[in-house]
Amino acid sequence: MKTMLPGILANLGESFHADRVLVLEDHRHTRRAGIYLSHSWQRTSVPQVATEWFSRYPFSSPEVMEWLLPLGEGDHVTQTEGHTSGAVAELFRELELKSILIVPIMVAGEVWGGVGVDCCTAERKWTPVEIDLLKIVANLIGATILRDRYVTALQESEQRFRAVADTAQDALIVVNSQGVVRYWNRAAERILGYTSKQAVGKKIHEWLAPARYHDSAARGLREFATGGHGTSLGKTRELAAIREDGAEIAIELALAPMRIEGEWCAVGIVRDITARKQAEQRMVWLARNDVLTALPNRTAFVEEIQQAIEHYRREQTGFAVCYLDLDHFKDINDTLGHAAGDLLLKHLAERLRNTLRETDRVARFGGDEFAVLMTNLSDPTDGGIVAEKILSVTNQPFFINGAEVHCSATLGLATCEYECSDPEVLLAHADAALYHAKAEGRGTFRFFTAALHNEVRDRITLLAELREAIAKDQLFLMYQPQVDMESGALVGLEALVRWRHPERGLIPPAQFIPAAENSGLIISLGKWVLREACRQTRSWMNMGLHVPVIAVNVSPTQFKGPSDLAAEVAATLACFDLSPEFLEIELTETALMQASGRNSNVMQNLRERGVRIAIDDFGTGYSCLDYLRRFPASRIKIAQTFISEIAGNSGSAAITRAAIGLGRELSLSVIAEGVETEEQAALLTKWGCKEAQGYLFARPLHFGDVSTLLEIGRVTFAGRVPATEDRTLTSAVAL
């Protein structure tokens, strides 16, 4: 419009015999308030009006606004000098006007401005033809302005589109109904390798889509061309694409239809998901494989066993499952380091791969535990031949970081003869056979037998019933008093769990606690014992009785469990409003020796909360001053193994005296377990041990008997609480 308008105004001025033609732009509705001179034409004899004059003139005065009011309604304004007054007359004088005709310029239904035709030499009246002609010109100017706006908006929109498209991380591709590329952004160049020049104008499916997609792509294009419809439109699909370098990559494609220049086109958003798919594949692999050895893990191995079971049912082809455990692998880790241990496991995995038949499968379950599935056995016992090969390659030296390392393995085998229906049952059978092989000397293998079958079945039944016993309160606690041997004062109570089976009566703790420990059920059992001990302690306190320290045995598995033991203990104490000093946690010396950094932190946390820590069965493990220094124990309990022999075995007596002296030097409380004779009590007192527990003082007592004892507050040699039928257990096996 800027180039055409000067000529239009000149022709208009000549046709109207006017002296001046002005195009004014009204900005009073915008932040740029005022009227601005957009374009003008005037005869040379007429003084030129300065552009800035219009921006300074007070068009907002009431008289001028009233005069120009028809323009806002889309009508024209005419005026001669002789019919003006006030502000309008002043306007005529400043512009040296005699007559004026103004027509509004309308753009999109709003007043954009106006076209004014001036006569400066004489007054004149404007004919209807002139008025209509000026309106036509004004309409043309308005239409041109509107078109320019649309063009500008379109250009800006295209610029924004290209800016967004060119900076987008995803590829943006536009193809027509024949599959010819019309647009290809920079991300498409980066992701797919083809430049825009290479891609635009070519049929996309012929070079970008793998051959397996060609037929379906052709069908989709034919359907799309008829009406812009297609099964892939409006959906996001995962496909493959061929890069310019020939590599196939995974992509995510979303398609939408669009009409462009009267033709149906498809706009595609393409995202490279190769990294994501690789990550997903890696996650799937990790879920089924061992990272260290790249062998299948337990999950994948169980599936292999299930397939072998199904094949056995169809074809009656024998198979066997083998558990493999390296002997004393912990010693290798402790002496050479965990990195060397990991390297040995990798070498062993490679040997097993090379030794086993193609039909066999080997897996790593974790640590030094491996499993082998031997298939296609004409006789299930033929697995022994494979087992001999495994033992042979395991016994050969390993060279780790220049050092020659020797190790052996123990194997347990289970064949398809026993309850061949559940992979977990077969694994349990192989594990039981492995356990017996280790008990017989290690470095060998054993098959699962009928006797072992009955043992495993009984253990599984026992665990199921124990789980039910915990849920149905078939368990109860008894307490063995801990006394000061000089005064007989009650200094503590050790909580001992008992199980009254509804059909089999009392089941010895030595029978169900090891099974619970091996299965992990010990965690639930331990929680029950802790909570029940705290509940009964609160009951005694509510009865007004003075309660000493309550000792609760804790399994090493509880320390290594998923929950925070220290927080769990604190929460249980808080639940029954008990102070931490009323609780003592007992942990065996052997478990203490195996404690990791995390376990040490748990014990430290317990001590910081005020809970006491006792080392149970002291002297039976690998006693070490360093462990006693590092772990925050408050008490050591000398094992019954030594106490029972102190009167007749000089070695046991020496160990007991040393333990008492060690406790005294380290400011640890010392208590003797399993004291049964007055002679033992006298020797212990003579050597400086003040506290003890055992049948000499009291057997484990029921809640009611403990209540009576707490009322008395002491135990004497002659006045021990008598044993009832339920208290005739031959030992006080603790949890």
Image (cartoon, rainbow, N blue to C red):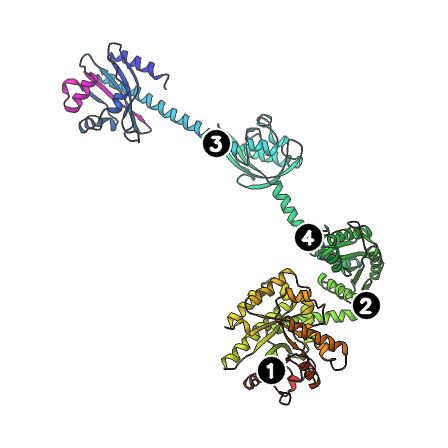
Please report whichever mark, 3 or 1, sits nearer to the chain's N-terminal start: 3
- Identity of the amino acid at label 1? His
Q: Which mark is residue 288?
A: 4
Relative depth, front residue between 227 and 687:
687
Q: Residues within 10 Å of mark 4 (few under 14, many from 20)?
A: some
> Which residue position is annotated with label 1?
702
Q: Which residues are magenta?
A: 80-109
Please report whichever mark, 2 or 4, sits nearer to the chain's N-terminal start: 4
- Identity of the amino acid at label 4? Arg
Q: Considering only vertical position in the picture, is 619 above or below 122?
A: below
Which quadrant does the N terminus fall into? top left
Res 129 seen here: no
Kindly indicate whether the residue at mark 3 contacts the one at mark 2 (C-beta within 8 angstroms).
no
- Identity of the amino acid at label 2? Glu
Kindly indicate whether the residue at mark 1 contacts the one at mark 4 (C-beta within 8 angstroms).
no
> Which residue position is annotated with label 3?
161
Residue in view at x 73 percent, y 53 percent: 342
Q: Considering the numbered disc 1 on the image, is that residue within a helix, a strand or a loop?
A: loop
Please report whichever mark, 4 or 1, sits nearer to the chain's N-terminal start: 4
Residue 157, picture quadrant: top left
Kindly indicate whether the residue at mark 4 contacts the one at mark 2 (C-beta within 8 angstroms).
no
**What is the count of numbered marks?**
4
Q: CA distance from mark 4 to mark 1?
A: 50 Å
Q: CA distance from mark 2 to mark 4?
A: 34 Å
Residue 356 on image: x %, y %: 81, 53
Left or right for 286, reference 455: left
Residue 510 on image: x %, y %: 70, 75
Which of label 4 and label 1 is nearer to you? Answer: 1
Is 94 a magenta residue?
yes
> Which residue position is annotated with label 2?
440
